[in-house]
Amino acid sequence: MPEKFDIAIIGSGPGGYVAAIRASQLGFKTALIEKDRVGGICLNWGCIPTKALLKSAELFNLVKRASEFGLKVENLGFDFKKIIQRSRQVAERLTKGVEFLLRKNNVTKISGHGFVLKPGLVGVKNEKDEIEIQASNIIIATGARPRELHGINIDGKVIITSKEAMLLEEPPRSMIIIGAGAIGVEFAYFYNSFGTKITLLEMMSSILPNEDKEITDILAKSFQKSGIDILTGTKVVEAKAVDGQAQVKIQNESGEKTLKADLALVAIGVRGNSDDLGLENVGVEVENSFIKVDKKTYKTNVDGIYAIGDVIGPPLLAHVASAEGIRCVENIAGVETLPIDYYGIPNCTYCIPQVASIGLTEEKAIELGYEIKVGRFPFRANGKALALGETEGMVKVIFDAKYGELLGAHIVGPEATELIAEFGVAKTLESTAFEIAKTIHAHPTLSETLMEASADSLKEAIHI
């Protein structure tokens, strides 16, 4: 007789494991099914280990500037294998931490490939056997993977994905990065820091194309100053390995040509992991590989089956998956909860300078018909930034002129990914420019730039 659970979750990434813990907290008997390691792509191959890599690059670049701080450093070098090794150790530590949390919360972890046999019944297959479990509610949290793109032949050796890019034994002499979203930009910064000649390709008109154009222009200039070649408005026609070298044929307003490098990193396009789950057998609707759900309850069109995270499509962010997982199980439990404001989700890119944003860009706000007030404040006018030697970048805020409501906030500069949280709280509380500008911020801190930018939108900034 199959073991009975209240909730069975297939996939243990930041959506699945968080949903499992919250479900257990709410009193549900919960099973978490995972065929690989808990934590999913984020903990094992994405968010966490890449930030460890980027910290090494940041420190290396900072030590190069030691003389600016009155310090002397001789014979500066790096051990690339140790840099990679440290990132793996960080990932391993967090994975063990999640395993502990699952045990602490009495979540039953089942190893194997999970799939839906019918509503209320899940199959799990591993190397040893195949079992069935009963579950009143089934949550699909299987994430996404790189999409196979026409003309791009990924071989994992010369034409690689981000996973292979995290395990290279030494930095290549040259690398072409296809796609200048967050993944492409972060790897561009990382490998450029250790001497790789980077060419960054983007089909859209700017790098980080979903960010505010004024912000990305600052980042692009910083990258170009550090020696990164950027080609925007550029389509990749073909990418393949030829005689152990990457050849990438591109097309832009200058015509068509072929670029060559030691490696090419493909950092564009993902597809939802919605296949091999038995969804077609029960009639769950899937569109372009992503499962269709009600974005308030995360119900599919089939009773008792839900889906969260990357497998339901953009925004493809770990913190979104976690939030969806919590909302999903709270809705199942009948607990009062706030629906996710998808315009209030922070986006973060961890290169140097960092980029972070929330809400509408200036262009989008105007397109939607808002009358806006825009405030700006440069880090070069902030005392803490000067003391840190990190003066590159700015804070930009967009408010509704009629009501003063915060519509969007955009930061490029030091600790942008931490600072954006204040604007997230402000947006949730429907704060106005006046309220942010009149909130006393400690001095000296980087956070003063948020206050000053808000004051600037009211023509009240003090230090510019």
Image (cartoon, grey):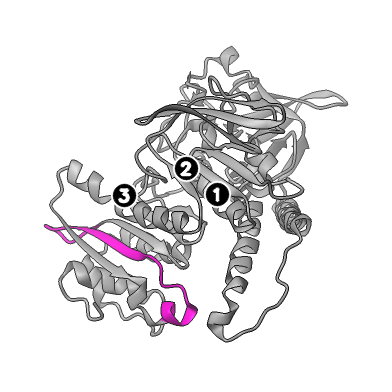
Say which element carries label 3.
helix
- The span picked out in magenta is 384-406
Q: Closest to the observer: 460 or 344?
A: 460
How busy is the neighbourhood of tag 3: few (under 14 within 10 Å), some, or many (20 plus)? Answer: some
The residue type indicated by label 1 comes to Ala
The residue type indicated by label 3 comes to Lys
Q: Position of residue 188 (x, y in %)?
A: 55, 49
**Disc 2 target residue:** 180
Q: CA distance from mark 1 to mark 2?
A: 9 Å
Q: Are marks 3 and 1 in contact (CB under 8 Å)?
A: no
Q: Closest to the observer: 257 or 137?
A: 257
Q: Is residue 240 left or right of residue 299?
A: right
Give the numbered dot on residue 213. Answer: 3
Is residue 397 part of the magenta span, yes or no? yes
Say which element carries label 2.
loop
Q: Closest to the observer: 197 or 105?
A: 197
How busy is the neighbourhood of tag 2: few (under 14 within 10 Å), some, or many (20 plus)? Answer: many
3 or 1: tag closer to the N-terminus = 1
Q: Are marks 1 and 2 in contact (CB under 8 Å)?
A: yes
Residue 404 can be seen, yes or no: yes
The residue type indicated by label 2 comes to Ala
The image quadrant that residue 311 belongs to is top right
Say which element carries label 1.
helix
Q: Position of residue 205 (x, y in %)?
A: 34, 39
1 or 2: tag closer to the N-terminus = 2
344 is higher (above) or lower (below) than 417: above
Q: CA distance from mark 2 to mark 3?
A: 14 Å
